[in-house]
Image: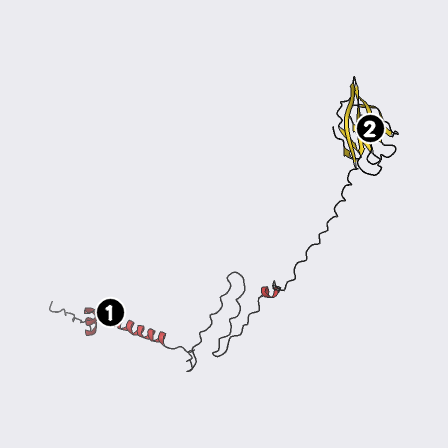
Amino acid sequence: MSGMRRAPRQFPPPGSTAVASSPWILVSVGVVIMVVLLVIAVGAYRGPGPDFQPVPPGQPPVAAAPMPERASSAGYHASASPPPVVPGLSPRRTDPPSATAEAMPTTSSPSQAAPPAKPSRTTAPPPPPAPPPAPLDARYQVLQVFQGGFIAEVLIHNTSRGDLGWVARVEYPGGRVVTAWLEGVPQGTFSGAGGTLTYRSGPELAGGSSVHLRFHIESAGSRPARCDVSGRACRGV
């Protein structure tokens, strides 16, 4: 044992022993470094940049016009931004006039407008009045009734002062005209077809005078469906 030597004991350097025994020193150094970097960053953010241009005294600051946004779906850029406004000068309109305003025609005021023309209305002339009936009075009566027929007359009176011709018409539907004559005066002409008697006077009837037209009717009632003399209805029907 006396022949073996003991190895000398090695001690750590004095600085490493202090760091190992005190770790808060490293933390403090890191915090200091972060604070310094933060101060440098804040100073760089607040400082003026290289493009900074001071505003000359006496002129108000001019706000920069916003850049036009790009159309999202139209596929083209918006129109160029208007020029900056210079103090003391009025801005000039640069956009083209509206096409709607140019295309709209100018209308005159209601006071200057010409009044509408009234449509011409063509009216037909009124029809001429019907001629008055002849001044003749006619009265119907049945004189005699027998088996299968009867005899009737129409008394015709001229109420005017002049001589008049006349036409008598008597209708018996379903009947038959046997004969007709004028009583006591020159005869006229008659026709009977289908129960209808038409008698035309011979000589004209003098004004204020009368004549008896008599006729024989068969297979019909004594009341005629129609009786008139020159357009005037018979009385007594």
Compared with residue 39, is residue 109 higher up or lower down, i.e. above or below? above
Q: Which residue is mark 1?
A: 27
Q: Nearer the viewer, residue 95 or 198?
A: 198
* Residue 110 occupies quadrant: bottom right
Q: Which residue is mark 2?
A: 212
Residue 122: percent from left, percent from top: 73, 51
Q: Residue at x 24, y 69 (%)?
A: 27
Q: In this image, 50 relative to 183: left or right?
A: left
Q: Residue furthest top?
A: 147
Secondary-structure class at tag 1:
helix
Residue 77: percent from left, percent from top: 53, 66
Q: Report the Cα–Cα distance between label 2 and label 1.
A: 161 Å
Quadrant of image for the C terminus = top right
Looking at the image, is mark 2 or mark 1 earlier in the sequence?
A: 1
Quadrant of image for the N terminus = bottom left
Q: Amino acid at mark 2?
A: His
Is there any visible trace of residue 199 in the rendered image?
A: yes
Q: In this image, 7 relative to 232: left or right?
A: left
Compared with residue 158, is residue 13 higher up or lower down, i.e. above or below? below
Which label sits on residue 215?
none
Determine crowd level at label 1: few under 14, some 14-19, many 20+ residues with C-alpha closer than 10 A: few
* Residue 235 occupies quadrant: top right
Q: Residue at x 77, y 24 (%)?
A: 142
Residue 48: percent from left, percent from top: 38, 77
Q: Nearer the viewer, residue 177 or 78?
A: 177
Q: Residue furthest bottom?
A: 57
Secondary-structure class at tag 2:
strand
